[in-house]
Image (cartoon, rainbow, N blue to C red):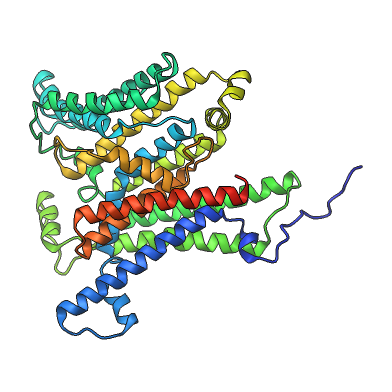
């Protein structure tokens, strides 16, 4: 029997949230992040009023006096999240294929050491280009990325072709690459790093107010185009579509999120003395009363680009389909003709490359390479992916969820630091949150049959 459609079918639901078709797990993570922000905003507001000696039982005053949601703290929170979030996007692929990578923190350290030595010894001395040469940053970044790619692929070869368990290979890598990094630098802190290289660290490199607004508007246009294209594709294939009001509601939420984020970052003003130094370096005199904001950090821009690329790979490419198919049922995937061993090499090569990109951001933010860079990052990265909804049993995970998981963890740690919670207690809370998140995910999957 054939059916004709005079107009596209629409999603029928009495529940407005169901009509929006928003992933309930993603919505839950956003809600958890919002709760964390409100709690620490109120907590810091109470502390501020107490220190001033004008404490009053006024929840509105607590909220507006808080420091957690100030432009300065939001800016710092974003640049602190980037390094772990970058690696968490790769860890999604690793865990989805039923593996684990315990070496990411040590691999980051090795890549950072390679880049630091390249900047301070290889390019200026061995290549004779001298310090502050414009080629230093691109050459060192290329060296670090090649290092991460090769080491990651080597891990994948050991796991895929020699069938050594990923836990053992990467546990060995945790010890090996941490000490390789120490050997490359002789156990010394190396710095300061190249000025152009430092632009990837956050505070030393931003897009500025005008370019941040341009980026925000372009991102908004791209998001709207994506919504329109998705709806048009569903109509063309006669699939059910969301009500028009739901499309506009989602578009409105996206617009508020993007433009609000840009506005908050632009509101963080560059200190006057720093502005004066910037003008002096240009040989100019700063106009009287001139002020401007930092805008979007370049490191955050890098994270956004990586997130888009990884999301496209996961959802729109053959490689992404193979990754999730293999994680869902490795035996069936191999019988279907998927070269699972080569796929393992590719997944760990991607993870190594992302460790190198993360090393750029982490060392540039510090402005030097230190021996303890990346310490315990492997645990933070795994926690971010798992909190973000990646199933340890394989086959399920999202890039956006992993980034949200990293943001939630960093928000918890930053908020607790602001209210004076000692570091050991911060780690206790993060550990409890990790276990609770996995428990909630297990309950959710049992109820939904996922």
Q: Quadrant of residue 275?
A: bottom left
Query: Residue 296: in sight, yes or no?
Result: no
Left or right: where 166 falls relative to 394: left
Please provide percent x and percent y for residue 277: 10, 54
Left or right: where 131 falls relative to 48: left
Residue at image point 42% right, 42% down:
307
375 and 369: which is toward the camera: 375
430 and 16: which is toward the camera: 430
* Quadrant in which the N terminus is drawn: top right
Answer above or below: position of 100 versus 340.
Answer: below
Q: Quadrant of residue 418?
A: bottom left
Left or right: where 298 falls relative to 186: right
221 and 19: which is toward the camera: 19
Answer above or below: position of 174 versus 232.
Answer: above
196 and 354: which is toward the camera: 354
Residue at image point 16% right, 31% down:
116
Residue pushed farthest right?
1
Number of numbered discs overlaid on the protein picture = 0
Left or right: where 370 falls relative to 221: left
Please provide percent x and percent y for residue 274: 13, 57
Query: Residue 178: in sight, yes or no?
Result: yes
Please provide percent x and percent y for residue 365: 20, 45
Please provide percent x and percent y for residue 257: 44, 60
Residue at image point 41% right, 55% down:
216
Residue at image point 10% right, 34% down:
190
Answer above or below: position of 267 versus 304.
Answer: below
* Quadrant in which the C terminus is drawn: top right
């Amino acid at each position: 029997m054939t059916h004709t459609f005079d107009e596209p079918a629409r999603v029928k639901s009495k529940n407005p949230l169901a009509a929006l078709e928003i992933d309930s797990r993603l919505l839950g993570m956003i809600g958890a992040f919002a709760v964390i922000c409100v709690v620490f905003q109120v907590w810091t507001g109470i502390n501020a009023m107490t220190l001033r000696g004008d404490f009053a039982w006024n929840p509105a005053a607590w909220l507006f006096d808080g420091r957690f949601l100030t432009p300065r703290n939001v800016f710092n929170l974003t640049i602190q999240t980037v390094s772990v979030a970058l690696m968490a996007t790769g860890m999604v692929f690793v865990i989805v294929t039923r593996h684990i990578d315990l070496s990411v923190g040590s691999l980051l350290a090795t890549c950072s050491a390679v880049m630091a030595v390249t900047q301070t010894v290889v390019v200026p001395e061995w290549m004779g280009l001298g310090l502050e040469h414009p080629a230093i940053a691109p050459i060192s970044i290329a060296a670090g990325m090649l290092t991460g790619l090769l080491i990651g692929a080597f891990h994948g070869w050991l796991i895929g072709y020699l069938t050594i368990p990923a836990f053992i290979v990467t546990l060995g890598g945790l010890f090996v690459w941490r000490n390789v990094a120490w050997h490359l630098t002789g156990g010394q802190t190396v710095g300061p790093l190249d000025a152009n290289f430092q632009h990837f660290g956050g505070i030393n490199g931003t897009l500025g107010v005008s370019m941040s607004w341009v980026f925000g508007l372009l991102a908004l246009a791209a998001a709207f185009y994506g919504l329109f294209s998705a709806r048009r594709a569903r109509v063309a294939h006669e699939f059910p579509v969301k009500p028009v009001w739901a499309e506009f509601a989602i578009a409105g939420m996206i617009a508020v999120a993007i433009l609000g984020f840009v506005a908050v970052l632009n509101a963080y003003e560059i200190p006057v003395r720093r502005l004066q130094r910037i003008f002096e370096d240009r040989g100019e005199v700063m106009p009287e009363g001139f002020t401007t904001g930092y805008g979007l950090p370049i490191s955050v821009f890098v994270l956004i680009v990586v997130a888009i690329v990884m999301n496209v790979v996961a959802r729109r490419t053959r490689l992404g389909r193979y990754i999730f198919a293999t994680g869902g049922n490795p035996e069936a995937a191999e019988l279907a003709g998927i070269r699972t061993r080569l796929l393992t090499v590719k997944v760990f090569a991607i993870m190594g490359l992302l460790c190198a990109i993360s090393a750029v951001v982490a060392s540039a933010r510090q402005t030097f390479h230190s021996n303890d860079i990346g310490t315990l990052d492997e645990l933070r990265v795994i926690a971010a992916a798992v909190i973000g909804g990646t199933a340890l049993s394989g086959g399920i995970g999202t890039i956006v969820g992993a980034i949200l998981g990293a943001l939630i963890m960093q928000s918890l740690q930053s908020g607790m630091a602001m209210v004076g919670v000692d570091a050991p207690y911060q780690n206790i809370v993060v550990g409890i949150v990790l276990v609770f998140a996995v428990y909630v995910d297990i309950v959710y999957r049992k109820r939904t049959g996922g």
